[in-house]
Amino acid sequence: MAHTPLMTSLGADSSLARKVAMVAFGSLLVGMSAQISVPMFPVPMTLQTLAISLIGLTYGARLAGATLLAYLAQGAAGLPVFAGGAAGAVHLVGPTGGFLVGFVAMAWLTGLLVERGLSGGLLRLFGAALVPALLLFVPGVAWLWFITPLDFEGALMAGAIPFQLGGIVKSLVAALIVTGAFAALKDRVK
């Protein structure tokens, strides 16, 4: 059974102009959230995954994936949208490259889970945000292990373990925000 993402429920039409505006806004949100970071090496802790979860929970799979592709293209083209104001295609193949590319899959999967039924209530939205956020560590850690001299355990310690609690909290915050937005929409329609 297909479910409606929040932006469609809010009356967002399917015009190309509306979709372009949503992609532009979403990529700006991800870029801004990358600037709120705790410097850690080699992977900084940012609010990007919170923004990506929000985009996936509200845009649906295709539009969320397109938004993150636009974000990566902006960064590769030289806009300072990566963590700490970094820019350039070199970051797509650096230590955080697996995470950056994984952001596209995270956004797409989050949107897909919402479209497939994980949109009704806080716990379902939390699951739709948390599962892709946890799966983000697969390409992130694998790439970190491949590109750096770290062994697998070192890559896990540098690129996954310190981020688990934050990932759970950010997934919960995203689910709370979207649950609140759905409740406000329901009240508005009454």
Image (cartoon, rainbow, N blue to C red):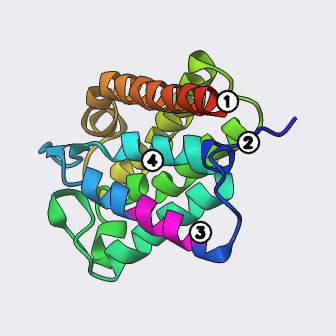
Q: Is residue 6 magenta?
A: no
Distance in Å between CA atoms under marks 2 and 4: 18 Å
In the image as oriented, which residue stretches furthest toward the top?
123
Depth order, front residue of 123/8: 8
Q: Residue at x 77, y 36 (%)?
A: 116
What's the residue type where badge 3 is placed? Arg
- From the image, tell me which residue sits under label 4: 52
Q: Residues within 10 Å of mark 3 (few under 14, many from 20)?
A: few
Residue sitting at x 30%, y 60%: 31
Mark 1 neighbour class, 10 Å CA radius: few under 14, some 14 to 19, many 20 or more: many
**Residue 102 position within the rendered picture, expressed as x and y whole percent measured from the top left:** 48, 53
Reading the image, the residue beneath label 3 is 18
Left or right of 41 on screen, residue 155:
right
| Quarter of the N terminus within the rendering | top right
Crowding at dot 4, Cα within 10 Å, few <14 / some 14-19 / many 20+, comes out as many
What's the distance in space between the residues labelled 2 and 1, CA to CA? 8 Å
Left or right of 120 in this view: 21: left
